[in-house]
Amino acid sequence: MYVCIRIYNIFFLYAVTRMSFIEYQDIIQDGDTAIVYLGHDSMFPVTIQHGSQTQTKYGVMRHSTDLIGKKYGSKVTCSKGGWVYILYPTPELWTMNLPHRTQILYSTDISLITMMLELKPGSVVCESGTGSGSLSHAIIRTVAPTGHLYTVEFHQQRAEKAMEEFRQHKVDHLVTVKNQDVCKSGFGMSHIADAVFLDIPSPWEAIGHAKSALKVEGGRICSFSPCIEQVQRTCRALEGHGFTEINTLEILLRVHDVRTIRLQIPDLGKPLEDQASPASDANDAPKPMTYSQDACSIFKSGVPPRETVGHTGYLTFATKSLF
Ligand SMILES: C[S@@+](CC[C@H](N)C(=O)[O-])C[C@H]1O[C@@H](n2cnc3c(N)ncnc32)[C@H](O)[C@@H]1O
């Protein structure tokens, strides 16, 4: 009897502390998805497995001895002496590192989508297409622990792969993946969604289904399209179905890099008060400039990049109102 209880307790402890994209866990465990961080522009995801090893440019990491049991955020030394950090996965890190099966949405657009759709814990959201699941992970994290995402993808392998990743990331209880054409069959449910998101080539064909999926009392919709002609057709469809507050935005990110700046100090001549007046004596005669031609000021500053990141797509938002 005693042995049974002990085994049950160990299993329970293991079950409640497994890695999940929606809550933090301190210790790296077998089966986790972790992010290997080599530098801010060099990261990759890894599935932690007893007996496995991962190659990096700094040498090998052995999962059993170098990773499992260590804290997330640890600095891990690889076999050639270089080191990496092992990071806990978040939707933002996943977006930067996920395997691309399609074009994906990035955190700049995702942040605006989340805010303008008014998503919060408990929200019910319908999405199509699922694609590589970049936006899906962010939505799931926002609506957890009581909300739900229904995501529709008509490409069978993509739908299956997304479901596999949701299971691996321990968020599958918060998401339902449907393999169907949203323009023909819709989301497969009526009047349950607080918000609908579309990232498909012909969103105007899905607006009627989106309206049916939204709650009777109303909700918000967003459609992402790279081309303005798609936006025009979507806006017309939204208007035709009685949506209000239709507006289209484009969000462009301009990051500033920290650089060391060297500025030559200009030779502005001598200050006015030093200039000789008629009353001044010989000792007050103007002195020669003493500034060195090479004098320069060195300081750190934030500078915008020479090339600005270009257009990703237009985000069209609208409201379904009760009246
Ligand atoms: C650009 S990807 C979506 C990317 C996704 N937003 C992300 O962040 O990873 C578009 C996806 O929509 C799917 N799709 C296109 N038309 C569809 C339709 N009528 N019904 C369901 N899925 C569709 C495609 O197969 C593709 O996987």
Image: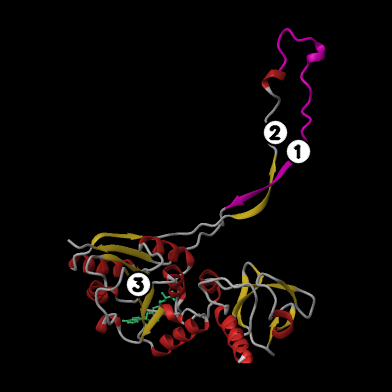
N-term mark: 1 or 3: 3
Which of these two is toward me, 213 or 267? 213
SS at circle 3: strand
> Percent position (x, y) of residue 185?
26, 84
Left or right? Give the position of 145 relative to 44: left
Residue 123 seen: yes
Residue drawn at x 38%, y 75% is 148
Dominant SS of magenta comes to loop
Binning the other alpha carbons within 10 Å of mark 3 as few (below 14), some (14 to 19) or many (20 upward) gives: many
Q: Is residue 297 above or below residue 65?
A: above
User: Residue 101: percent from the left, percent from the top?
Assistant: 47, 82
> Which residue is found at the position 60% from the left and 88% from the top?
5
Circle 1 residue: 293
Question: Mark 1 and mark 2 in contact (Cβ < 8 Å)?
Answer: yes
Compared with 283, 171 (above or below) is below
Q: Which mark is residue 267?
A: 2
Q: Quadrant of residue 123?
A: bottom left
